[in-house]
Image (cartoon, rainbow, N blue to C red):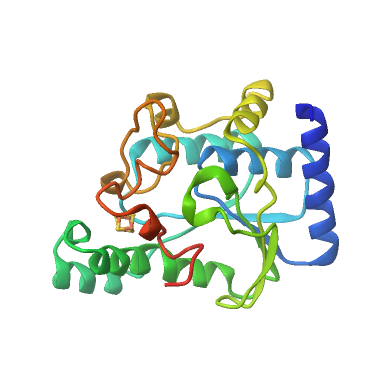
Amino acid sequence: MTTAQREQQLIDELRDICQKHHKVVLASSLGVEDMLLTHVIAKEKLPVGIFTLDTGRLPEATHRLLSRVVEQYQLHIKVYFPEAQDVEQLIEQQGTNGFYHSIEARKSCCKVRKVLPLARALKGQQAWLTGLRREQSMTRQQLEKSLWDSDHGLVKYNPLLDWSQEEVWQYVREHHVPYNALHDQGYPSIGCEPCTRAVAEGESERSGRWWWEHPETKECGLHIAQ
Ligand code: SF4
């Protein structure tokens, strides 16, 4: 399939989703897949709200990208932060970088900084979009293109599920879509600064996230129930 055909298929799918639901949001991590979706939503003027989660531990490159995207596309991107008192309590319990000490501590941090803010962001919505792709990791192999998200009470769509990494980058380059500068420094997947690192040639896309854990535990709780 050509990039143009891929794009048309995606536009049709997104239009279909917007016809089925009145309140649709894109949960953007500002990763390259979400930038592709943002570009298409802006270009086609689709009625999709966009939000992102600022965990308080993001790299500066991600903040720079957010600022650029808002300016370039003239979009409103709502930013959700963790509750201050939850973060204070977390730091009291496990220290500033306690997430390195155990999977439980890491999940507690992800819960406060990502999972709870996500729940607030999705409240009252009817459908949410993600940029998840099946080939990103072993935890994403069994995903469906659309599913009922019982945790949040709405439909979840993964419109890029079958796109390859090459197809995403081809589209982004052809359409001059802005992306995080860290992608050019060996980071295929970008999250919080202390939990993300560059990967070597040939390593899996998500191997730079929580690299001290086993592959089957490496989700933050945004996409897999804890
Ligand atoms: S990715 Fe790391 S710093 Fe970010 S919320 Fe999860 S454990 Fe905390």
| Residue 117 against residue 97 in the figure, above or below | below
Q: Is residue 52 visible?
A: no
| Residue 34 against residue 200 in the figure, above or below | below
Left/right placement of residue 188 relative to residue 150 reads left
In this view of the protein, which residue sits in the foreground, 57 or 206?
Answer: 206
Q: Is residue 138 visible?
A: yes
Residue 163: x %, y % from top left: 66, 40
User: Measuring 45% from the left and 39% from the top, which residue is drawn there?
Assistant: 205
| Residue 120 against residue 56 in the figure, above or below | below
In this view of the protein, which residue sits in the foreground, 76 or 100?
Answer: 100
Query: If the image is split into quadrants, where does the C terminus sit?
Result: bottom left
Left/right placement of residue 116 relative to residue 35 reads left
Left/right placement of residue 178 relative to residue 127 reads left
Q: Quadrant of residue 108?
A: bottom left
Residue 170: x %, y % from top left: 64, 25
Query: If the image is split into quadrants, where does the N terminus sit?
Result: top right
In this view of the protein, which residue sits in the foreground, 87 or 219?
Answer: 219
Residue 102: x %, y % from top left: 20, 63
User: Measuring 61% from the left and 50% from the top, which residue is drawn there?
Assistant: 76
Quadrant containing ligand 1 reads: bottom left
Q: How many marks?
A: 0
Q: Quadrant of residue 121?
A: bottom right
User: Measuring 80% from the left and 29% from the top, which residue is drawn there?
Assistant: 4
